[in-house]
Image (cartoon, rainbow, N blue to C red):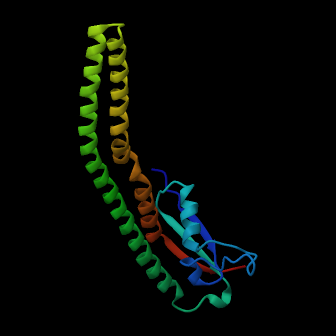
Amino acid sequence: MPETATLEIGVHLQTIEDLFVDPDTNPFENPNLRLSGMQTILNELDVRHLKPPMSLTIYLPTEQITPGLLDRTKEALKRYCKFQAENQDIEVRSTRMGGRRSLASGLIGATISVILAGFGYFLASRYGYSALGILGTMLGSFFMLTAWVVIWTPVDTLIYYWRPAWHEARKYRLIAKADVRILPEK
């Protein structure tokens, strides 16, 4: 069995607080604009396969590395990732629930539209190319399109809308399990 490759990510920070808080982003005062370490990690995971294990290396200036910093950082990282993953899970459940609710009303609307479309097509088949037949064809086509439009968003919500939040939760869970190291910046 082939050995699983470790996903390795490194972030360069000025202080450990920059792991969770955006550094100074005032371009008048700071020419080196950066994101927080967490946002940098999340952005990096967007372009990688989310396969564990993961190794996270935090590079800090030597004077910023203090005794116990690694343990405090691991705990803070786990706490933060757990909090964020749970919030994303709530978003997934909320989106799915909204999709189910909208599906119920969408099915009612689509059913009514299909019935009206059937009536329009009945008129079209009954009266052929007369004005009433042409009007029936137009009504049938209009209400079939309406049925499709009415059901589209609920189905789309149930199939796709929840996936970005689910993906974010996966990223946070992967980070929470990462093997964390803190090394001095060279």
**Relative height, residue 175 to residue 107 (above, below):** below
Q: Position of residue 53 (x, y in %)?
A: 47, 63
Q: Position of residue 171 (x, y in %)?
A: 46, 62
Q: Quadrant of residue 121?
A: top left
Q: Horizontal placement of 185 versus 158: left or right?
A: right
**Relative height, residue 148 to residue 46 (above, below):** above
Q: How many marks?
A: 0
Q: Horizontal placement of 119 versus 164: left or right?
A: left
Q: Position of residue 9 (x, y in %)?
A: 58, 66
What residue is shown at x 41% (from left), y 78% (from top)?
79
What residue is shown at x 74% (from left), y 81% (from top)?
29
Decide which of 166, 180 is in the foreground and name it.
Answer: 166
What residue is shown at x 58% (from left), y 61% (from top)?
44
**Relative height, residue 173 to residue 119 (above, below):** below
Q: Quadrant of residue 89?
A: bottom left
**Relative height, residue 146 to residue 160 (above, below):** above
Q: Horizontal placement of 5 versus 1: left or right?
A: right
Q: Position of residue 32 (x, y in %)?
A: 73, 75
Q: Quadrant of the C terminus?
A: bottom right
Decide which of 62, 87 is in the foreground and name it.
Answer: 87
Decide which of 184, 41 is in the foreground and name it.
Answer: 41
What residue is shown at x 32% (from left), y 18% (from top)?
136
Q: Horizontal placement of 168 versus 113: left or right?
A: right
